[in-house]
Image (cartoon, rainbow, N blue to C red):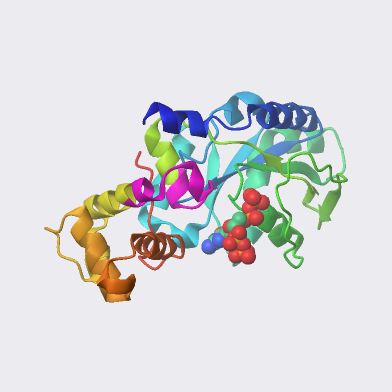
């Protein structure tokens, strides 16, 4: 990645430190945490500091947006995380898929502690938990799904303090209403591209043409059939030929029949983000 882009991506360290400090404080109140990752990019959406931050606190990993990911890859990542000692499962917070099974997984993660408490004759009590994840991974959507309430749009506005509330979820959970926002770390340029393609970071952070170039190259390498089916391209087309082809097919043209590349970029990105090319996973183990 060029120095210019690297510089652009060094974002708000001030907010990140504040957020980490706040999470560290809140962690003291928790029995366990839920680490929310994007199933399309389980590695890129994992802030490497999370695991250091939570230390010995029991945790479960939830791979959200499973509806947009490649299911085989998601299943492989569940095994990958299990090998690393973390219980993991896939969910779709938007369509409330697998949400009811989260409680069971949490109980497994807390098995020893709960057994100790039972042995001491303590009453079963709600599990105190919070959701941690990078922006846009679906934290608010998951809180709403767990609370079984209508989705409310909660913007990530740093500096706006919200009253902290616990939501009681049946007998199982007491969930902190405010998610812990962690920022992704761009340890290599692929991470930046994966976050940008899926819309986890704003489009202007990396140049759109570079994002699309990376995306098409990736799709050509790993999901060629889908690319051919969707855009009717041929495998020998160059990058620019593919753009031209999509532009003509979709009528993304300027006056004088020139290709409107900005529109072509948006068509391709919105197709990928909306699942029009099927479930895609960008991170490879
Ligand atoms: P955050 O709190 O972590 O920042 O994320 P938030 O819940 O706001 O979710 C970010 C976007 O991801 C939202 O879309 C949300 O609907 C979508 N989303 C969350 N979970 C899932 C999922 O499992 N599958 C899919 N396909 N999408 C999911 P948005 O376009 O920003 O808003 P809207 O479409 O809800 O209006």
Is 4 on the left or on the right of 180, as rendered? left
Q: Position of residue 233 (x, y in %)?
A: 19, 67
Is 74 on the left or on the right of 220, as rendered? right
Is 90 on the left or on the right of 127, as rendered? left
Question: Which residue is found at the position 39% from the left and 34% from the top?
Answer: 189
The answer to whether residue 253 is magenta is: no
Where ligand 1 lies, by image quadrant? bottom right
Q: Residue furthest left?
A: 236
Q: Which contiguous range is marked in magenta?
A: 195-212
60 vs 66, nearest the viewer: 66
Note whether 155 is above or below 234 in the view shown: above
Numbered disc total: 0
Name the chief secondary structure element in magenta.
helix
Question: Which residue is found at the position 47% from the left and 32% from the top?
Answer: 186
Q: Position of residue 190 (x, y in %)?
A: 38, 38
Q: Position of residue 44 (x, y in %)?
A: 46, 39
Quarter holding the C terminus is: top left
130 vs 139, nearest the viewer: 139
């Amino acid at each position: 990645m060029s120095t210019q882009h690297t510089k652009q991506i060094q974002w708000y360290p001030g907010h990140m430190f504040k957020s980490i400090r706040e999470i560290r404080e809140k962690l003291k109140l928790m029995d366990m945490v839920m680490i929310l990752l994007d199933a399309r990019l389980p590695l890129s959406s994992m802030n490497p500091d999370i695991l250091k931050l939570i230390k010995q606190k029991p945790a479960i990993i939830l791979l959200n947006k499973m509806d947009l990911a490649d299911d085989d890859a998601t299943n492989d990542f569940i095994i990958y995380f299990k090998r690393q000692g973390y219980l993991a499962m896939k969910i779709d917070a938007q369509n409330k898929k697998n949400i009811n099974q989260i409680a069971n997984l949490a109980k497994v993660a807390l098995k020893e502690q709960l057994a100790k408490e039972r042995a001491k004759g303590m009453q079963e009590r709600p599990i105190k938990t919070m959701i941690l994840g990078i922006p846009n991974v679906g934290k608010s959507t998951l809180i709403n799904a767990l609370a079984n309430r209508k989705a409310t749009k909660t913007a990530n506005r740093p500096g706006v303090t919200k009253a902290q509330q616990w939501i009681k979820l049946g007998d199982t959970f007491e969930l902190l209403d405010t998610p812990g926002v962690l920022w992704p770390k761009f340890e290599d340029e692929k991470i930046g591209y994966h976050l940008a393609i899926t819309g986890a970071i704003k489009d202007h952070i990396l140049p759109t043409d570079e994002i699309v170039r990376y995306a098409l190259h990736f799709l050509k390498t790993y999901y060629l059939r889908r690319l051919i089916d969707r855009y009717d391209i041929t495998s020998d087309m160059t990058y620019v030929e593919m753009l031209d082809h999509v532009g003509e097919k979709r009528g993304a043209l300027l006056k004088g029949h020139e290709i409107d590349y900005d529109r072509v970029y948006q068509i391709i990105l919105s197709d990928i983000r909306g699942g029009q090319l099927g479930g895609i996973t960008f991170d490879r183990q």
